[in-house]
Amino acid sequence: MSMVPDPSTHASDSLPATLTAQQWLAPSPPTVRATLSYLVPGDEKPVHYSYEPPPGEPWESGRYEETQISIGDARMLAGQPSIHREGFELWDAPTELRNYNDPDEIRRAYYPELEALATRVTGGRRAYVFDHLVRQRESDRGPLTFGRSQRGQHAAPNARIHNDYTEQSGRRRLSLVLGADISGDPMPRYCIINVWRSLRGPVLDTPLAICDARSVDASDLVEAEVRYPRRNGEIYLAVRAQRHSWWHYSGLDRHEALVFKQYDSRLSGVSRFVPHAAFLHPEAPADALPRISIEARCLVLMD
């Protein structure tokens, strides 16, 4: 399960020269106040473009409210969260991946690691990694948005509170991943998880906040469309609710994997959706290295 990272493992490229291992390992506050970006409810379905939009179209529609939220450090929890209860777990899971700029190496070297990890975390019988995304903080450290990327560049951290799949797109994903292998009535139970990892040592700049699935109601989630060059996807955005319980893991290192639920075909009794977003940590050093991370989505057959 989770463990305190050892910064000396990657000291050459994980920390800025002015920040020592002792400084970043100093006890972090159990709770921080930071800004998260909630959707303001509206009449139209929000749309995000992942590429340069057509002339006259905005990068994203909808309005967002920047809200100060208390975000707890999950490392301070007395007990370990569960992927099927709170909806997330942190695992010590070193990787052999070296070149994150080579998609073929990621698929060849990284996907099998994640599939093995996914079955261990969830208790599932078979796992299929079906996509991944490398994100890199912009060098100018401009305002956080929904993570759009310029042509030829990695995506940026996504600060809009979102869940990768909706009820509809989660159901569609089974046939897209398994195709003709789908059989049986009723359909097998499955879930979709996101595996999130730092690629540059401890994350001090723009860490990831995750919301306890037990604090999220269906009424908090709004369908939104994401337009890609060759297809359209559907995600959930979130509207503000006082009961939301937010967490992050301080100093996430690259030997650690944060695994969180994005869909479950079981309708009750388990976590189903874990909204998440990047945020500006108020305690981060001004010269912290920009975050580079990789996230991969994996479909897991549970029975």
Image (tube, rainbow, N blue to C red):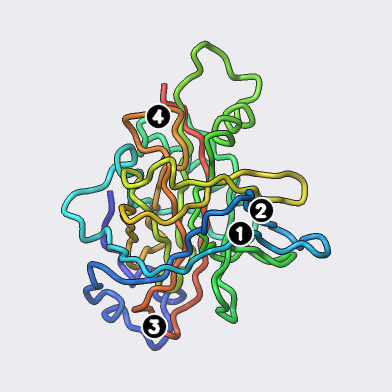
For residue 212, side relative to residue 181 (left or right): left
Mark 3 = which residue?
285
**Picture coordinates of residue 195 (x, y %)?**
46, 48
Residue 255, image quadrant: bottom left
Q: Which mark is residue 47?
A: 2
Q: In the image, which is nearer the foreground, mark 2 or mark 3?
A: 2
Q: CA distance from mark 2 to mark 3?
A: 34 Å
Q: Amino acid at mark 2?
A: Val
Q: In the image, which is nearer the foreground, mark 4 or mark 1?
A: 1
Q: Amino acid at mark 1?
A: Gly
Residue drawn at x 43%, y 85% as measured from the top left: 286
Residue drawn at x 23%, y 48% as measured from the top left: 80
Q: Secondary structure at mark 4?
A: loop
**Picture coordinates of residue 258 (x, y %)?**
39, 52
Q: In the image, which is nearer the foreground, mark 3 or mark 4?
A: 3
Check contact, mark 2 vs mark 1: CB within 8 A.
Answer: yes
Q: Earlier in the sequence, mark 3 or mark 4?
A: 4
Q: CA distance from mark 2 to mark 1?
A: 7 Å
Q: Does residue 37 sit above or below 123 in this rendering? A: below
Instruction: Return the residue found at the far left.
Output: 78
Mark 4 = which residue?
124
Q: Earlier in the sequence, mark 1 or mark 3?
A: 1
Q: In the image, which is nearer the foreground, mark 2 or mark 4?
A: 2
Q: Which mark is residue 62?
A: 1
Q: Amino acid at mark 3?
A: Pro
Check contact, mark 4 vs mark 1: CB within 8 A.
Answer: no
Q: Amino acid at mark 4?
A: Gly
The answer to which of 125 and 205 lies nearer the viewer is: 205
